[in-house]
């Protein structure tokens, strides 16, 4: 039996155990669009597989209904922890701020107090979080989507606000996205250190088990020999085989892959690692207009992001890919964050033999789906979320990949 016990800090053994049972399940509690509408079946699947670390459970990329986001996140976290108190839920604080959302968000008194500032009645300021020289302004489009600058006090206040909300709502892990964008001009990463120190100090007093796991997309950052993060995280970085359509391999040294490059140091929990434990994922970031073509020496896989590339294969091939990737990652000292639920760029089709069309109409927007009903009454569902769930009336668009995840995990020695 794996040991998942911790309190106040986390040993390497326990950290590795959690990472060995990690999944990416976007919006299990809530994402910026809506919570997963198949929550009951999602939880069934996660418990059946033995998942212990649920990545991207809660996130905000663009905007959200703040009160509803927090209410549902808190309620679902309580349900999950009643089912398995050991499960760690991860909230995300990304390299993305959107003007309408940020400018509408009130700054609670406790944020001012945490920074030793006079309490004001005001909202957060999008403009005060930007790079003054225009770096990464409108990086995500011309409609007010930018990368925040960690050097700005307003940015650090917002990150603290978001982190504390997740901790208060039962989350015990935080992902900080592309930390090298937010901290592009943070000399020595001292502002990032200040921010993470403040978040960890709050968690030490108020988190469920008085500890919060922090990670970001990085090969590793240390300040005075101490790692900023508890473990490193990175995409897979698949390498195409040009003569075999859609075929890819993993290869040490390929572009900016993490294999053999996870930097070490003293961890926030007080133990040292020459190379920090790391987690890799099937990342999502869109597609190239010319897909499907091989794009060697890039982060695309035949022009697709990694989760879309996986989804484009039939079920038996996806199972073989997951087995291959899992084995490669473990041989290289890392852990695979299994694909569970994640947004897609491409649509995939599934057929529901006896559909509840009223339910489909209700969840269509939240689940990125559209459908038609054929002459025999079957619903042909086109959807842009990957779900590993076994297909059933509880999750009619499930892809059935939970079986291989269970097989791989339960087949470990």
Image: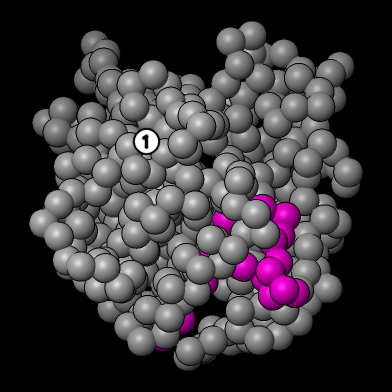
Q: Residue at x 51, y 32 (%)?
A: 133
242 to 32, vertically: above or below: above
Left or right: 167 in relation to 231: left
Query: Could you say which is closer to the camera, residue 129 or residue 16?
Result: 129
Quarter holding residue 240: top right
Q: Within the image, what quadrant is residue 192 found in?
A: bottom right
Q: Position of residue 143 (x, y in %)?
A: 33, 21
Q: Which one is nearer the viewer's eye here, 263 or 289?
A: 263
User: What stretch of residues is rendered in magenta?
Assistant: 208-229
Where is residue 102, by image quadrant? Answer: top left
Looking at the image, which residue is at 43% across and 51% down? 152
Between 380 and 1, the one lying in front of the other is 1
- Check if residue 211 falls in the magenta segment: yes
Q: Which residue is mark 1?
A: 397
Which residue is at 36% across, 63% downward? 160
| Residue 48 among those drawn in magenta | no
Q: Nearer the viewer, residue 341 or 89?
A: 89
In the image, residue 41 above or below residue 74: above
Mark 1 secondary-structure assignment:
loop
Locate residue 260, reporting x and y percent.
86, 57
Residue for point 59% across, 63% down: 190
- 148 with respect to 286 (left or right): left
Q: Is residue 393 visible?
A: no
What is the chief secondary structure element of the magenta stretch? loop
The crowd level at tag 1 (other Cα within 10 Å; few <14, some 14-19, many 20+) is many
The location of residue 288, given as percent across then percent down, is 61, 16
**Position of residue 334 measured from the top left corner of the image (x, y, whole percent):** 74, 62
């Amino acid at each position: 039996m794996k040991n998942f016990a911790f309190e106040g800090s986390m040993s390497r053994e326990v950290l590795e155990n959690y990472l060995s049972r990690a999944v990416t399940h976007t919006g299990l509690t809530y994402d910026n669009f809506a919570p997963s509408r198949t929550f009951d079946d999602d939880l069934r699947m996660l418990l059946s597989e033995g998942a212990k670390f649920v990545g991207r459970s809660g996130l905000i990329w663009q905007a959200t209904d703040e009160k509803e986001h927090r209410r549902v996140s808190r309620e679902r976290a309580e349900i999950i922890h009643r089912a398995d108190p050991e499960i760690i839920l991860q909230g995300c604080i990304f390299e993305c701020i959107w003007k309408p959302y940020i400018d509408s968000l009130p700054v609670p008194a406790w944020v001012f107090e945490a920074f030793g500032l006079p309490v004001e009645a005001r909202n957060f300021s999008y403009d005060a979080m930007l790079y003054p020289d225009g770096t990464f302004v409108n990086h995500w489009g011309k409609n007010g989507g930018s990368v925040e600058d960690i050097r700005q006090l307003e940015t650090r206040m917002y990150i603290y606000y978001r982190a504390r909300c997740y901790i208060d709502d039962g989350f015990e892990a935080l992902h900080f996205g592309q930390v090298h964008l937010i901290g592009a001009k943070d000399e020595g990463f001292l502002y990032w250190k200040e921010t993470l120190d403040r978040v960890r100090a709050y968690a030490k007093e108020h988190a469920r088990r008085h500890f919060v796991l922090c990670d970001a997309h990085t090969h590793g950052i240390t300040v005075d020999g101490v790692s900023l993060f508890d473990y490193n995280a990175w995409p897979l970085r698949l390498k195409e085989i040009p003569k075999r359509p859609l075929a890819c391999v993993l290869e040490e040294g390929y572009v900016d892959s993490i294999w053999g490059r996870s930097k070490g140091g003293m961890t926030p929990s007080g133990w040292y690692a020459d190379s920090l434990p790391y987690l890799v994922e099937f990342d999502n970031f869109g597609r190239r207009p010319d897909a499907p073509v091989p794009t060697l020496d890039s982060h695309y896989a035949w022009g697709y992001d990694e989760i879309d590339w996986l989804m484009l294969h039939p079920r038996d091939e996806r199972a073989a890919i997951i087995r291959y990737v899992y084995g490669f990652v473990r041989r290289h000292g890392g852990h695979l964050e299994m694909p569970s639920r994640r947004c897609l760029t491409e649509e995939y089709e599934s057929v529901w033999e006896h559909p509840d069309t009223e339910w489909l109409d209700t969840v269509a927007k939240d689940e990125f789906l559209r459908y038609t009903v054929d002459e025999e009454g079957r619903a042909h569902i086109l959807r842009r979320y990957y779900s590993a769930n076994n297909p059933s009336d509880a999750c009619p668009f499930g892809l059935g990949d939970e079986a291989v995840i269970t097989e791989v995990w339960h087949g470990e020695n």
